[in-house]
Image (cartoon, rainbow, N blue to C red):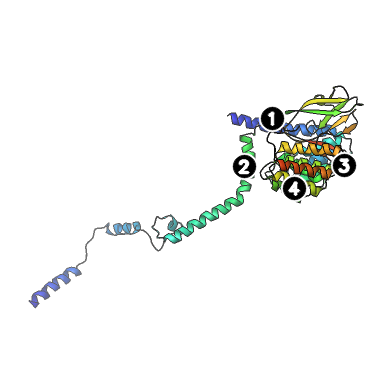
């Protein structure tokens, strides 16, 4: 029994000692298979990020990261919102021009019994006393009046009597003029609805 | 397409207006004054300030026969006041608000007072409150009192037409011989007491 075993062992050892016969393309096939295997320890920096992988994160950590990102984004947005708003305004105005309110009719009246000529001047007519649309007409009793169109907004104006005397409108808010020495009047014209 | 046409029309109108303003300045100012005023206007444009009030100030000076140096100084000071006004009122303030605030500063109202009026008005325009405030100051109501009254009226929700009516009543009282401070205080108290009338017609 023991002799039989020894013979078998010798046969096996002999068979194992025989050189393995492989075909000529074996080496090439083995190397090709090796090259196709994924690299682990020698991955490039970019491929480590690009390669799909499964990451395990604790829910608490994920929630904290998400909350931090939201807070960061909101704070950033709050800081740049004013700048964005300012930058967007001209573009928005160019694309959707704001509706321009039509000029409004305003009655200017001055009591000047001795006047021979009364004109209204203001920032709505370039302070031009010769502007034909702003020449007051004498309505009798020393009352001079003109119904003129004025753009919506805040304006400063005055009467010019006989091309020389500047008179503020006694019925309107005053604007003390510290620049040129005469008091002007103010008017806030609103769009009639 | 319509929006594009409107946008182009708007841009052309703005460019045409700018040229027209420059033309008016060139016609009415002497060359050195024109150059100096133009430089201030250009600086204001870069700083995104409204430039029309500056052009108007120069035209006003020319119409009143002021010399060039005085005109340049006036335009320069107005640009400074408007810069302060926009700083106080915020970058979203309208050109009319900046103009009215600049006028109020010229009348002696402080930036702190402007802040108070702005805060009292909330999101409403402060053009009319500042116009009335400037008028009161011009009629010898002390600035502290005038500011407090306008702030009080704004906080009470008094609307622009009622503010204009308040100004007219104060002016009428002063013309009849009332003390300006007493007239303004009494009228303001009466307006706050009865509440703002929603049916008051806008004053013009």
**Mark 4, residue position:** B114
Question: How far apart are the two marked residues, 4 and 2, measured between alpha carbons?
Answer: 28 Å
Q: Secondary structure at mark 1?
A: loop
Residue A88 circle label? 2
Question: How far apart are the two marked residues, 3 and 1, measured between alpha carbons?
Answer: 38 Å
Crowdedness near tag 3: few (<14), some (14–19) or many (≥20) residues, C-alpha within 10 Å = some
Please state which of the two labelled residues, at mark 2 or mark 1, is closer to the viewer.
Answer: 1
Regarding residue B80, the answer to whether it shows in the image is no
Please report the residue visible at 60 percent of the width from the left and 31 percent of the height from the top.
B4
Tag 1, which chain?
A
Q: Secondary structure at mark 2?
A: helix
What is the residue that sits farthest to the bottom in this orientation? A2
Q: Are marks 3 and 4 in contact (CB under 8 Å)?
A: no
The lab-note entry on whether marks 3 and 2 share a chain reads no
Residue B70 circle label? 3
**Mark 1, residue position:** A192
Looking at the picture, how far across and down is residue A129, in whole percent?
85, 29
The lab-note entry on whether marks 3 and 1 share a chain reads no
Please report the residue visible at 45 percent of the width from the left and 61 percent of the height from the top.
A61
Looking at the picture, how far across and down is residue B148, in whole percent?
76, 48
């Amino acid at each position: 029994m023991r002799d039989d075993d020894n013979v078998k062992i010798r046969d096996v050892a002999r068979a194992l000692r025989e050189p393995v016969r492989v075909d000529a393309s074996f080496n090439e096939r083995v190397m090709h298979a090796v090259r196709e295997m994924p690299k682990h320890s020698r991955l490039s920096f970019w491929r480590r990020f690009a390669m799909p992988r499964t990451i395990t994160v604790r829910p608490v950590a994920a929630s904290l990261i998400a909350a931090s990102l939201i807070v960061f984004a909101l704070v950033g947005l709050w800081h740049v919102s004013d700048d964005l708003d300012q930058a967007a305004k001209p573009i928005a105005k160019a694309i959707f021009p704001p509706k321009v309110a039509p000029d409004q009719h305003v009655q200017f009246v001055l009591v000047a019994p001795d006047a021979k000529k009364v004109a209204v001047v203001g920032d709505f007519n370039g302070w031009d006393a010769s502007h034909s649309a702003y020449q007051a007409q004498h309505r009798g009793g020393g009352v001079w009046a003109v119904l003129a169109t004025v753009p919506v907004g805040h304006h400063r104006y005055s009467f010019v009597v006989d091309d020389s005397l500047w008179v503020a409108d006694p019925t309107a808010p005053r604007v003390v003029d510290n620049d040129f020495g005469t008091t002007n009047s103010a008017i806030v014209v609103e769009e009639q609805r | 397409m319509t929006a594009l046409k409107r946008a182009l029309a708007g841009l052309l109108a703005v460019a045409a207006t700018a040229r027209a303003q420059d033309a008016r300045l060139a016609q009415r100012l002497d060359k050195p004054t024109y150059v100096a005023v133009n430089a201030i206007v250009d600086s204001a444009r870069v700083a995104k300030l409204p430039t029309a009030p500056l052009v108007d100030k120069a035209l006003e000076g020319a119409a009143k026969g002021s010399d060039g140096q005085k005109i340049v100084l006036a335009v320069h000071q107005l640009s400074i006041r408007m810069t302060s006004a926009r700083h106080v009122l915020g970058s979203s303030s309208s050109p009319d608000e900046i103009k009215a605030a600049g006028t109020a500063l010229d009348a002696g109202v402080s930036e702190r007072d402007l802040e108070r009026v702005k805060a009292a008005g909330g999101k409403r325009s402060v053009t009319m409150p500042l116009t009335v405030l400037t008028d009161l100051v011009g009629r010898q109501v002390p600035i502290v009192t005038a500011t407090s009254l306008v702030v009080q009226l704004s906080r009470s929700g008094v609307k622009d037409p009622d503010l204009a009516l308040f100004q007219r009543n104060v002016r009428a009282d002063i013309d009849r011989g009332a003390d300006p401070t007493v007239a303004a205080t009494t009228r303001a108290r009466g307006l706050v007491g009865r509440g703002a009338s929603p049916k008051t017609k806008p004053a013009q």
